[in-house]
Image (spheres, rainbow, N blue to C red):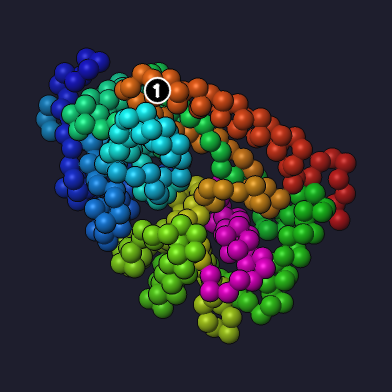
Amino acid sequence: MPDGQDSLVARIVERIADVPSASWDALAGTDNPFVSHTFLNILEESNSVGARAGWLPRHLLVEDAKGRLVAACPLYLKNHSQGEYVFDHGWAHAWERAGGAYYPKLQVAVPFSPVPGQRLLVGDGTDAPALRRALASTLETLTERLDVSSVHVTFPDRPDWEALGAAGWVQRVGRQFHWANAGYGSFDDFLGALSSRKRKNIRKERKAIAEAGIEVRALSGADITPRHWDAFYRFYQDTYDRKWGHPYLTRHCFDLMQERMGDAVVLVMAFRDARPIAGALNLKGPSALYGRNWGCAEDIPFLHFECCYYQAIDYAIAHGLERVEAGTQGPHKIQRGYMPVETYSAHFIPDRGLRAAVARFCEAERREVEAEMALIEDEYSPFRKDSDDTG
């Protein structure tokens, strides 16, 4: 291997079940449930990823001379760009119009999960920088050996992103909207930090849900029953049917989450007369609540905000979590206390012409993202300034 790592050996496995969970998780850490061996294995075992979904596992492992796993990344061979949330369709179309073949490609990612975190799993030892370089170089080599157009690392943390940039990969910046816990003791404490108009609007929206006779509860662990999952899966299917087409996650996937992830699953359910009418799925880490999927059986004003945003804030405050990461999209989240944060991706594109075009696009896009985030902070923040009243 390059960079003086001659004693290391890289190999690919097509099932994460073939990797000892303790070895994988020792590199992935405990901060983010989405890169855990358990979560990635649930996706595979439930047939949520695989040939049906067009996400073929090709996980990259790096082992030392004694066969010990020292670095890894969740890697997939793909023939489309669905379920990624970092959009490269325009790149694909341009390359194919020029006579190239953009697919298949390699994707270092957590499928269907736009959750920032480690993607180059190297542990926290002093050799982490060298191991990141080794993973990057091995991924580059795989583009030739597997005859793919490119490799894309989506939603890495900043150390991974910077390491890939230093290796010459094209760097891309996006943004999401996260809620930050400033030590609030209650939801009312949080409301007190907002401007008067935003505070009154949120109270009005929450009151409307209560007056509609809807009960909303956050369920976790043994409190979630098969009845709840059956209802949520119907909501989930309906949302995809109306908006995105194919629902990737199978019904079995939710059963396995319940069985193997326990209290890390937080399912917010809305009920009318004890009948489930909406739900929002979250996963919990040590410091954050991660919003994932939402669906409903009735179109009720403000119900989405209650289930996905306000209940998540309530839960984070009650459990001492630092933040809520509510997924993609989101200008409507700003007035509800969710502020912009940068997200990252990195892209290895061997063809010089395509790489140069993508680099120009990413540089222009980055300036736009930075300008938008600055404008939101300066002009559209919902948080109270000194001149605001406290009514």
Q: Where's the C terminus, which quadrant?
A: bottom right
Spot occupied by residue 32 in the image (x, y as percentages of width and height):
41, 45
Q: Is residue 230 above or below residue 136?
A: below
| Vertical side of 248 occupied by 157: above or below | above
Residue 78 is situated, as x and y percent measured from the top left of the image, at 29, 43
Q: Quadrant of the N terminus?
A: top left
Along the horizontal axis of the image, is 7 left or right of 192?
left
Picture residue at 50% right of the left edge, 27% below the top = 362
Residue 192 in percent (x, y) is at 77, 52
Residue at coordinates 56% horizontally, 48% vertically from top-left?
Answer: 329
User: Which percent across, then down, holds residue 16?
Assistant: 22, 47
Query: Over which residues does the magenta segment extend?
Result: 296-324
For the residue carrying disc 1, how many other residues have a C-alpha within 10 Å: few (<14), some (14-19), or many (20+)? some
> Label 1 amino acid?
Arg
Q: Of residues 91 and 125, which is closer to you in this image?
A: 91
- Does residue 140 appear anywhere in the picture? yes
In the displayed orientation, state which residue is furthest to the top. 4
Which residue is at 68% across, 72% downward?
A: 209
Q: Is residue 332 above or below residue 365?
A: below
Q: Is residue 311 magenta?
A: yes
Corner quadrant of residue 200: bottom right
Q: Is residue 123 left or right of residue 165?
A: left
Q: Residue at x 18, y 29 (%)?
A: 145
Q: Please state if 285 lies on the left or on the right of 45 as rendered.
A: right
Kindly indicate the quadrant of the structure image that contains residue 260.
Answer: bottom left
Q: Which residue is mark 1?
A: 355
Residue 29 appears in view = no
Local SS, label 1: helix
